Image (spheres, rainbow, N blue to C red):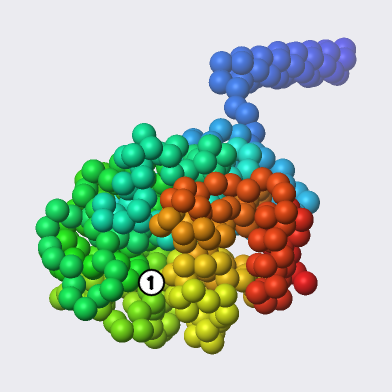
């Protein structure tokens, strides 16, 4: 009996222990679940697009954050592109509409106080860059008096030509005169040209965005008039290149943002056989010279990482001749070798040929564009740029006659100019639309 009672007591103790353990386990589990319920839910970390790209491409994170904020969705597009393509900085224009160099400048604020940068348009669609040869608005020459006599700009430019110029995204001209009410004509110089400052308003009517002052007539009335000219262009807010109060100003590039790409324009002259226009130096006002092309070559090379495209505008060549000088050919090619994308020339007063050198165009001479009363063939050189930065090049034939320049849109004269330019050209010709193509 005693043994049976002990066994019952043991079983009871075990049962009680089991029940207590079970209850305790239930209470503990309940407590843990209650604690979990009170804790905030946490999500697994998903790296954002800036973090993802920062590990894939060599651009600084601050730049990526800037682009992400300013151009919503662009980094997502770039991330998707990189699934199938290698990274290239050209992709930035594809996803934002601006090249890497432009975006980088925006990010660093480099345009905020710059006096030599102008943004012309957005990046949508094609862009057209147009260039003319020599223009004179001198009061003591032919065009300005005819402008007054005929009632304004339509008296010296045909309607189609004026429309083409104004509709260009960008238009550059060679301004072949000084601007001042002071000074005396340089002695022993056969032709000297001077306009009063108000004449510069005509450039606005024409749609001009940039003028080259690197030529042999901007100093025709001496230093005082030359300095007045620089002041007048600044007063009329007309960007200009190729001349200055010193070499720094004369060689200073002007940048334009066109179609989302950054263009650098520079200008220089090697026009005079009997040199009367001074060279700008550290202590002297004048023009930027390229009689020795080394300085221009150095300038072009210095712009390699500062612009997407570099275009030097050069005043050179033999006057009244369609033949090319050896110095024209060798220097223009050297500028391409240094990094120029297009070389544009004028000074000969007549058209000369073109060349495709390493796939890049050299326009040796655009001749007179709007200069005097003579009847002379001329042309508007035009770059047509697509959104991806690819370019086509055209010569738009024109005729200066009786102090008025008109665009030739069809007919035998147009075809004759195409044929003439082709016959003077090197490794290139014009097709039936005036497009510059390889032979």
Relative horizontal placement of residue 172, taking residue 159 as reference (left or right)? left
Residue 352 horizontal/vertical position (percent)? 58, 71
Asked if 21 appears above or below 321 in the picture, the reply is above
Relative horizontal placement of residue 235, taking residue 163 as reference (left or right)? left
Q: Residue at x 70, y 61 (%)?
A: 416
Asked if 191 appears above or below 142 in the picture, the reply is below
For residue 434, what is the image quadrant? Answer: bottom right
For residue 11, what is the image quadrant? Answer: top right
Asked if 197 appears above or below 301 in the picture, the reply is above
Q: Nearer the viewer, residue 20 or 389?
A: 389
Asked if 287 appears above or below 202 in the picture, the reply is below
Relative horizontal placement of residue 301, taking residue 391 as reference (left or right)? left
Q: Residue at x 32, y 71 (%)?
A: 216
Classify 10 Å Cα crowding around label 1: few (below 14), some (14-19), many (20 and above).
Answer: many
SS at badge 1: strand
Residue 265 horizontal/vertical position (percent)? 43, 61
Q: Nearer the viewer, residue 2 or 332?
A: 332
* Residue denoted by label 1: 268
Residue 203 horizontal/vertical position (percent)? 36, 45
Residue 58 visible, this orientation: no
Q: Residue at x 54, y 87 (%)?
A: 326
Q: Nearer the viewer, residue 125 or 438?
A: 438
Residue 209 visible, this orientation: yes
Q: Residue at x 63, y 39 (%)?
A: 125
Residue 251 horizontal/vertical position (percent)? 32, 69
Q: Nearer the viewer, residue 169 or 278?
A: 278
Quadrant into which the N terminus falls: top right
Q: How many marks?
A: 1
């Amino acid at each position: 009996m005693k043994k049976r009672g002990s066994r019952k007591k043991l079983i009871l103790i075990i049962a009680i222990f089991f029940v207590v353990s079970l209850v305790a386990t239930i209470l503990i589990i309940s407590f843990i679940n209650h604690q979990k319920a009170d804790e905030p839910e946490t999500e697994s970390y998903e790296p954002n697009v800036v973090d993802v790209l920062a590990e894939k491409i060599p651009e600084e994170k601050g730049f990526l954050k800037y682009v992400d904020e300013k151009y919503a969705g662009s980094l997502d597009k770039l991330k998707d592109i990189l699934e199938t393509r290698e990274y290239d900085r050209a992709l930035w224009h594809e996803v934002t509409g601006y090249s890497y160099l432009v975006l980088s400048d925006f990010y660093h604020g480099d345009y905020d106080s710059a006096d030599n940068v102008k943004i012309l348009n957005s990046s949508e669609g094609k862009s057209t860059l147009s260039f003319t040869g020599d223009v004179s608005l001198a009061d003591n020459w032919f065009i300005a008096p005819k402008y007054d006599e005929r009632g304004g700009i339509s008296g010296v430019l045909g309607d189609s030509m004026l429309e083409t110029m104004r509709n260009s995204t960008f238009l550059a001209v060679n301004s072949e005169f000084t601007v001042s009410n002071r000074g005396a004509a340089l002695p022993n110089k056969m032709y000297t040209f001077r306009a009063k400052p108000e004449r510069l308003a005509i450039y606005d009517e024409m749609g001009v965005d940039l003028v080259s002052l690197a030529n042999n007539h901007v100093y025709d009335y001496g230093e005082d008039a030359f300095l007045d000219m620089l002041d007048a262009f600044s007063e009329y807010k007309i960007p200009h290149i190729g001349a200055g109060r010193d070499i720094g100003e004369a060689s200073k590039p002007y940048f334009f943002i066109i179609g989302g790409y950054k263009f650098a324009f520079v200008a220089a002259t090697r026009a005079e056989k009997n040199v009367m226009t001074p060279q700008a130096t550290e202590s002297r006002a004048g023009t930027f010279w390229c009689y020795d092309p080394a300085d221009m070559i150095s300038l072009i090379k210095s712009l390699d990482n500062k612009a997407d495209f570099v275009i030097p505008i050069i005043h050179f060549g033999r006057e009244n001749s369609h033949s090319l000088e050896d110095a024209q050919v060798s220097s223009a090619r050297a500028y391409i070798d240094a990094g120029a994308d297009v070389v544009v020339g004028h000074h000969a007063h007549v058209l000369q040929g073109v060349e495709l050198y390493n796939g890049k165009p050299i326009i040796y001479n655009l001749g007179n564009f709007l200069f005097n009363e003579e009847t002379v063939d001329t042309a508007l050189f035009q770059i047509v740029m697509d959104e991806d930065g690819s370019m086509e090049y055209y010569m738009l034939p024109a005729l200066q006659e009786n102090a008025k320049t008109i665009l030739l849109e069809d007919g035998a004269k147009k075809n004759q100019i195409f044929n003439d330019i082709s016959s003077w050209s090197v490794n290139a010709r014009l097709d039936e639309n005036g497009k510059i193509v390889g032979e």
